[in-house]
Image: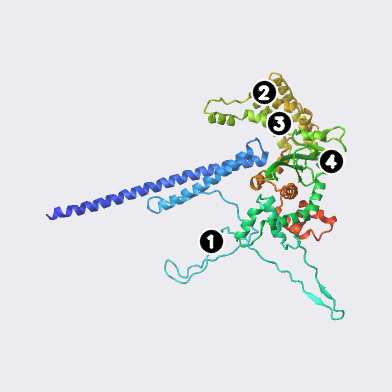
């Protein structure tokens, strides 16, 4: 009887033991699964990191080696960010699972080593008091052996302050005249906005593509009310103060031996709708042929794309002009132009682009997938061959980039000319076999009809194969279009062009635009007109580096 009564209890204990074992096995399996998932995520993140690093190294060493380079880098960076976030999330999940079991070790990611924190950042030491008694025997006879330091990067929220400038008044006991120091200069008349704040507003709008209404909302959340109209007044006043500096920048750019030119669209508000204005840029960059002059860029706004605008911009310029085949430039190359026709140098990247589109195997395969196989991918063998030959020219250019013009010309005569002659013969022969409406024929005609401009680099070592310098300068405006949506007026377009000139030029000279603008705005009123050139980015950089060098 007693044995019969004990049986149910034993069964319950056995069932509980079996449940504990099953639960432990389930936790063990879940922990192992989480660790394996974390390992896979880490591997994927590491692969993405290595791919991005390789592409960046290629880009830095060789420049854009295909039309897909910039797009590929953007995609890889987005992919890396998502994979890194997923890997960290899986790592934490694996650690949480491992804590529930004693048989599975926790997982720790082997992250890529980060760069040391900049030495110029202030350090704040937070000392965690050490023990007062030995954790082993309890003795209080301890002596310091050393210390371990863990560095954590932190940020202090932006702080606003009001600077009160006190000007004491004195009266003369003899003649009772009142004496007082002059009022400090303010860039904004009656606005009393400091140069650092004003530089931040300008750089946020024209360098970081943040419209004034978004800035106003952010400042309000930080407890400082700066209305949209107030910010707009500040921008207008700053543009007026900085105009002499822009004029000095113009003078520097248009004394170049060679210029890059290009333009892009800018939507402009006009009577309840938007019209398509243009933003033109002219870039001086002598670095490819070893020139000593610093790089710079100027921008201009116009309401349309009429050829009269580049003719007005370049009215006093004579020299080499690298640009695309826009018809509005035709007047610049006219033999009777004063002070003389510009020497046209065409862009091989523009010539290569249509061939690349016809030879892009990946894009062709993508079109086939999108059309569910109804359209067979079309890849032109002629386009592939032309791209191969053009890429061979760019490979030669990479080796001579930055060398003196004479050395570049010698290498081109020896290495590039035979390739160019063969390319001309190949395209001419293939063109004769194609119909007038063929896309390949149109791409070939674009090159052959402008052959003297495309081969200008064979007779002048200063010429570049591409117009990438101008395209890089315009890149930021594409981001601005997405943020601003449109320029408020023609005056707003002109103001944006001037400020973009200053900011892009600062970046081209490896200068922090906001720090430079803040210093310029603080000093420009005190400088005589003849010394404004001292504030140009390259002169400013040299003056700020002199104390460090000493």
Image marks 3 and 2: residues in contact by CB distance under 8 Å: no
Q: Nearer the viewer, mark 4 or mark 1?
A: 4
Q: Is residue 25 left or right of residue 64?
A: left
Tell me the mark number nearer the camera, choosing from 4 and 3. Answer: 4
Residue at the far front in the pictured view: 271
Crowding at dot 4, Cα within 10 Å, few <14 / some 14-19 / many 20+, comes out as some
Q: What secondary structure is found at the residue carrying circle 1?
A: loop
Q: Where does label 4 land, which residue?
A: 315
What residue is disc 1 on? 148
**Mark pair 1, 2: CA separation:** 71 Å
Of residues 280 and 390, the one nearer the viewer is 280
> Which residue lies at the image location 79% right of the left edge and 75% below the top edge?
169
Separation (CA) of disc 2 from disc 4: 39 Å
On the image, numbered disc 3 is attached to which residue?
351
Which label's residue is closer to the chain start, 4 or 1? Answer: 1
The residue at the point 49 percent across, 47 percent down is: 87
Q: Picture coordinates of residue 388 (x, y %)?
A: 66, 28
| Quarter of the rendering containing residue 475 | top right
Upstream in sequence: badge 3 or badge 2: 3
* CA distance separating discs 3 and 2: 16 Å
Q: Position of residue 99 (x, y in %)?
A: 40, 54
Q: Is residue 359 left or right of residue 407?
A: left
Q: Which label was assigned to residue 438?
A: 2
Foreground: disc 3 or disc 2: 2
The quarter of the picture where residue 196 lies is: bottom right
């Amino acid at each position: 009887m007693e044995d019969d009564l004990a049986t149910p209890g034993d069964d319950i204990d056995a069932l509980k033991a079996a449940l504990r074992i099953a639960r432990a096995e389930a936790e063990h399996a879940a922990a192992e699964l989480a660790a394996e998932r974390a390992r896979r995520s880490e591997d994927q993140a590491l692969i993405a990191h290595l791919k991005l690093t390789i592409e960046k190294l290629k880009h830095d060493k060789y420049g854009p080696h295909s039309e897909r380079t910039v797009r590929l880098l953007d995609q890889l960076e987005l992919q890396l960010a998502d994979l890194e976030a997923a890997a960290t999330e899986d790592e934490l999940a694996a650690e949480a699972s491992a804590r529930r079991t004693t048989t599975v070790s926790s997982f720790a990611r082997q992250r890529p080593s980060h760069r040391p924190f900049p030495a110029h950042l202030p350090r704040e030491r937070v000392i965690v008091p050490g023990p007062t008694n030995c954790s082993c025997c309890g003795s209080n006879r301890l002596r310091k052996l050393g210390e371990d330091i863990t560095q954590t990067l932190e940020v202090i929220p932006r702080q606003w302050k009001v600077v009160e400038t006190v000007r004491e008044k004195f009266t003369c006991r003899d003649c009772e005249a009142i004496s007082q120091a002059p009022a400090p200069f303010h860039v904004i008349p009656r606005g009393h906005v400091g140069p650092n704040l004003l530089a931040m507003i300008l750089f946020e709008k024209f360098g970081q593509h943040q419209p004034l209404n978004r800035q106003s909302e952010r400042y309000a959340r930080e407890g400082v009310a700066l209305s949209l109209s107030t910010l707009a007044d500040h921008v207008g006043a700053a543009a007026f103060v900085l105009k002499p500096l822009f004029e000095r920048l113009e003078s520097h750019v248009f004394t170049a031996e060679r210029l890059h030119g290009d333009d892009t669209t800018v939507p402009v508000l006009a009577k309840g709708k938007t019209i398509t204005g243009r933003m033109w840029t002219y870039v001086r960059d002598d670095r490819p042929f070893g020139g000593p002059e610093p790089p710079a860029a100027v921008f201009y706004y116009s309401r349309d794309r009429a050829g009269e605008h580049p003719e007005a911009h370049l009215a006093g310029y004579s020299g080499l002009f690298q640009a695309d085949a826009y018809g509005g430039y035709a007047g610049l190359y006219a033999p009777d132009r004063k002070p003389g026709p510009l020497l046209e140098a065409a862009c091989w990247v523009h010539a290569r682009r249509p061939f690349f589109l016809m030879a892009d195997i990946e894009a062709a395969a993508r079109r086939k997938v999108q059309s569910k196989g109804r359209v067979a991918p079309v890849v032109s063998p002629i386009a592939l061959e032309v791209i191969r030959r053009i890429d061979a020219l760019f490979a030669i250019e990479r080796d001579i980039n930055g060398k003196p013009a004479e050395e570049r010309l010698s290498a081109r005569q020896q290495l590039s000319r035979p390739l160019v002659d063969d390319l001309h013969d190949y395209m001419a022969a293939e063109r004769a076999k194609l119909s007038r409406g063929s896309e390949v024929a149109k791409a070939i005609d674009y090159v052959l009809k402008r052959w003297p401009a495309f081969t200008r680099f064979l007779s002048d070592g200063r010429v570049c194969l591409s117009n990438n310098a101008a395209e890089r300068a315009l890149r930021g405006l594409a981001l601005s279009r997405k943020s601003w949506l449109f320029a408020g007026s023609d005056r707003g377009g002109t103001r944006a062009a001037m400020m973009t000139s200053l900011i892009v030029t600062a970046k081209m000279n490896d200068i922090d635009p906001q720090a430079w603008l803040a210093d310029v705005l603080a000093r420009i009123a005190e400088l005589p007109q003849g010394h404004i050139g001292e504030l140009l980015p390259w002169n400013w950089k040299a003056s700020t580096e002199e104390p460090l060098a000493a």
